[in-house]
Image (tube, rainbow, N blue to C red):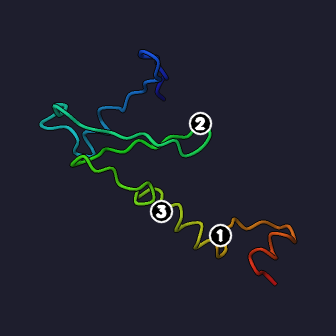
């Protein structure tokens, strides 16, 4: 578990070195001279940190983890057409055209 630290007026958290090694971020065990990252707030107290290559920030929807979760929801029937979450209420059933 990491600890949230304060630096200037921002919160800072570290990425364990073994994770960076496993993902091939380190060069011969050393940190690269420059590695850009983007932090997306995806929900209350939930953040997604992505490394950016070439200066282009890909859309959040292109992130592997986002696609994996979306596919899981679709395959499990957790979403109906129109991207509305399924619910058990009669109103939600009508919105999703359930019978």
Q: Which mark is residue 79?
A: 1
Q: Earlier in the sequence, mark 3 or mark 2?
A: 2
Identify the residue shown where x is 64% and y is 73%.
Answer: 82
Q: Is residue 56 above or below residue 7?
A: below
Q: Position of residue 83 (x, y in %)?
A: 63, 68
Q: Residues within 10 Å of mark 1 (few under 14, many from 20)?
A: some
Residue linked to disc 3: 68
Query: Could you say which is closer to the camera, residue 85 or residue 19?
Result: 85
Identify the residue shown where x is 49% and y is 23%.
Answer: 4
| Displayed quadrant of residue 90 | bottom right
Query: Could you say which is closer to the camera, residue 10 or residue 27?
Result: 10
Query: Could you say which is closer to the camera, residue 21 or residue 40?
Result: 40
Question: Furthest residue to the left?
Answer: 28
Quadrant in which the C terminus is drawn: bottom right
Q: Earlier in the sequence, mark 3 or mark 1?
A: 3
Q: Earlier in the sequence, mark 2 or mark 1?
A: 2
Q: Residues within 10 Å of mark 3 (few under 14, many from 20)?
A: few
Left or right relative to 37: residue 90: right
Q: Secondary structure at mark 2?
A: loop
Q: Which mark is residue 45?
A: 2
Camera-nearest label, 3 or 2: 2
Identify the residue shown where x is 28% and y is 50%.
Answer: 56
Camera-nearest label, 3 or 1: 1
Q: Position of residue 77 (x, y in %)?
A: 65, 73
Left or right relative to 78: residue 1: left
């Amino acid at each position: 578990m990491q600890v949230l630290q304060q630096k200037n007026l921002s919160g800072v958290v570290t990425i364990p070195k073994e994770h960076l090694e496993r993902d091939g971020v380190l060069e011969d065990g050393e940190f690269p001279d420059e590695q850009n990252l983007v932090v997306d707030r995806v929900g209350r107290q939930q953040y997604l940190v992505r490394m950016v290559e070439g200066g282009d920030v890909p859309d959040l929807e292109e992130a592997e983890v986002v696609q994996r979760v979306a596919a899981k929801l679709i395959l499990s029937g957790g979403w109906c057409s129109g991207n509305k979450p399924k619910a058990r209420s009669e109103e939600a059933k009508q919105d999703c055209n359930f019978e």
